[in-house]
Amino acid sequence: MTRRRARFPNGTRALFIGADRIMPKDSIKETAPLKTNVIYGGDCVAAMERLPENSVDLIFADPPYNLQLGGELHRPDNSRVDGVDDAWDRFDNFAAYDEFSRRWLKAARRILKDTGSLWVIGSYHNIFRVGSILQDIGFWMLNDIVWRKSNPMPNFRGTRFTNAHETLIWCAKDKDAKYTFNYEAMKNLNEGLQMRSDWTLPLCTGDERIKGTDGNKLHPTQKPESLLYRVLLAATKPGDVVLDPFFGTGTTGAVAKQLGRKYIGCERDADYIAAARERLALVKQVADDKLLSTPSKRSEPRIPFGTVVERGMLPPGTVLSDPSGRFTAKVRADGTLISAEHRGSIHQVGAAVQGAPACNGWTFWHVKMGKNLVAIDAFRQKVRAEMVALN
Ligand SMILES: C[S@@+](CC[C@H](N)C(=O)[O-])C[C@H]1O[C@@H](n2cnc3c(N)ncnc32)[C@H](O)[C@@H]1O
């Protein structure tokens, strides 16, 4: 890959770059209020150490992978594979990589809010080392996500399996931390099914891939926006502060801005910073705040089943059944159910007929409407929609 030299103005070791300003590094004071929608130039550890503690809602890190590529790699047609051979990805040995990982993870943990979470993406070259270190310094793993690449690069030499995934570790600040997880938003994104930990998404290609003046890709490891979209939608709220210590071309910042989150980037390569700034200037934030958040089910008004009965939607005597038709119960005038052997709330009777410890009666019980079985939750949603329209 043709690379231009990273350069900062003479005598200035690092820069603090906002959307329209450049300030010397020494002007960043730890006591100063957190500035957002900015890129810190230079080393990310130095930058993070100058930020206030407990100030950031989410950290997304795509650190050097320490790929240790041995020699050039060619395709069968003899063209050279544009792998990651950049200076920023080279470490003398595993010990040096571990030392670096420990330093940036510690700095990240200090600035992370107690309610925040950290995501790290990596490959088999580095993710296990990073995972072990982050556990050692107190982070608590929540999930590891497999990003399954729908268009991976083949193993040209045919000596190993196609390397078709990367791993993301998602962790909270400690075991008892109350982190953000937008469960409903993830379920909605997945058409009503609980989102799983294996995500199939394409590599960053086409127009999304930023090119250098030579027409080649500017950055060897630019991540797809779709990956960041899912991460930020899952674990942040509008207005939250998202920090990326290895900003590269600014993918995290671009998606954060689009989704109405604030970003802070750290990046030590001046060319990447310039590309990220250009990119960020073009990003449009979703204009209507209402489109950005998913109200949690718990924050919706509580509707007792009795309301559905007294409103005449499911009058007394209506026969309900589970989706398989195995269990049935009748609606009573007071909003309880009665089956052959049990009586009680929709939840109690649902649990009792199955011999289960608990049951969500709203999704378990159905009513026949024409040829279809409809979950009684549909009636609750109708009442809720009317209440929202009235307010
Ligand atoms: C794997 S890339 C991140 C790419 C980015 N996610 C994107 O979508 O463009 C890692 C980046 O971290 C930067 N970097 C490496 N070490 C750094 C350090 N100590 N401080 C700040 N940036 C660093 C590199 O210049 C590189 O751009």
Image (tube, rainbow, N blue to C red):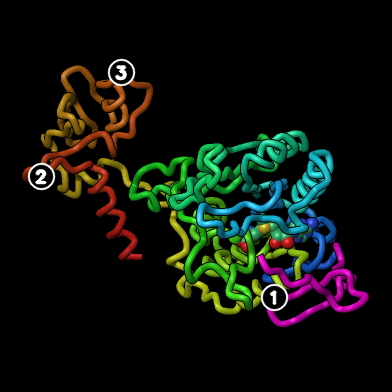
SS type, badge 2: strand
SS type, badge 1: helix
Asked if disc 2 and disc 1 are in contact, CB closer than 8 Å, the reply is: no
- Per the model, the C-alpha gap separating discs 3 and 2 is 27 Å
Camera-near label (2 vs 1) is 1
Q: Could you say which quadrant of the image residue 279 lies in?
A: bottom right
Amino acid at the residue labelled 2: Met
* Residue behind mark 2: 369
Q: Is residue 76 left or right of residue 55?
A: left
What percent of the width, then of the height, locates residue 359?
33, 29
Sequence-wise first label, 1 or 3 = 1
Amino acid at the residue labelled 3: Gly
Sequence-wise first label, 3 or 2 = 3
Q: Is residue 20 a member of the stretch shown in magenta?
A: yes
Residue 57 in view, yes or no: no
- Per the model, the C-alpha gap separating discs 2 and 1 is 60 Å
Ligand 1 in which quarter: bottom right
Chain part drawn in magenta: 1-30
* Residue behind mark 3: 355
SS type, badge 3: loop
Quadrant in the picture for the C terminus: bottom left
**Residue at 23 percent of width and 35 percent of height:** 365
- Per the model, the C-alpha gap separating discs 1 and 3 is 62 Å
Q: Which mark is residue 368?
A: none
* Residue behind mark 1: 274
What percent of the width, then of the height, locates residue 150?
44, 50
What percent of the width, then of the height, locates residue 44?
79, 59
